[in-house]
Image: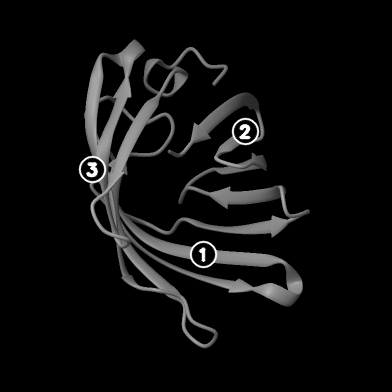
């Protein structure tokens, strides 16, 4: 990300799926010399009538101080006809020592591209994701001010 802040400038994450519903891993922020635990547990999978519910933890929001973690529960639901997936979370922020309410909407532009609008509980971002097999390239507009790039792949 194009920023003078140390923590979000470069970020590397690795996760391992212990089960279909439990992912645990580490996040490394080399400019901030920081390693954090990340994880997600899907408590309820989405069905045609019910949303997905998951619990998780990661480093706190973009721009948060080194060493702060967040803990969240997220509810999401896809709407196939509209090509939309919406989510809302309740998030405990160690940085703020309180709760915030992240939310977002992902619009499928094609089978290989989507546009994600998200709010991290305080500030909004936009991300264009382009998927090719196991690789996803994300073009970010963080805080509607700063560009960023995300590259992910699975194996």
User: Is mark 1 in CB contact (under 8 Å) with mark 3?
Assistant: no
Decide if residue 139 is on the left or right side of residue 43. right
Q: Earlier in the sequence, mark 3 or mark 2?
A: 3
Q: Which mark, by number, is residue 137?
A: 2
Q: Which mark, by number, is residue 87?
A: 1
Q: Which residue is mark 3?
A: 94
Query: Which element carries disc 2, helix, strand or loop?
Result: strand
Depth order, front residue of 96/79: 79
Of the residues tagged 1 and 3, which is closer to the observer?
1
Q: Which mark, by number, is residue 20?
A: none
Of the residues tagged 3 and 2, which is closer to the observer?
2
Depth order, front residue of 96/116: 116
Can residue 25 be seen? yes
Q: Residue at x 72, y 67 (%)?
A: 83
Q: Earlier in the sequence, mark 1 or mark 2?
A: 1
Q: Quadrant of residue 77?
A: bottom right
Of the residues tagged 1 and 2, which is closer to the observer?
2
User: Is mark 3 in CB contact (under 8 Å) with mark 2?
Assistant: no
Q: Residues within 10 Å of mark 3 (few under 14, many from 20)?
A: some
Query: Which element carries disc 1, helix, strand or loop?
Result: strand
Q: Residue at x 30, y 62 (%)?
A: 21
Decide if residue 143 is on the left or right side of residue 83. left
């Amino acid at each position: 990300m194009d920023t003078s802040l140390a923590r979000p400038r470069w970020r590397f994450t690795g996760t391992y799926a212990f089960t279909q519903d439990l992912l645990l891993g580490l996040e490394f922020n080399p400019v901030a010399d920081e390693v954090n635990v990340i994880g997600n547990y899907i408590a309820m999978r989405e069905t045609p009538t019910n949303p997905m519910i998951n619990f998780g933890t990661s480093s706190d929001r973009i721009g948060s101080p080194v060493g702060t973690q967040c803990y969240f529960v997220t509810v999401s639901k896809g709407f196939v006809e509209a090509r939309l997936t919406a989510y809302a979370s309740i998030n405990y922020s160690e940085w703020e020592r309180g709760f915030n309410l992240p939310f977002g909407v992902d619009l499928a532009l094609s089978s290989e591209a989507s546009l994600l609008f998200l709010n991290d509980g305080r500030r909004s971002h936009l991300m264009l994701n382009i998927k090719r097999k196991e690789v996803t390239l994300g073009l970010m507009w963080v805080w509607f001010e700063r560009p960023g790039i995300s590259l992910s792949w699975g194996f």
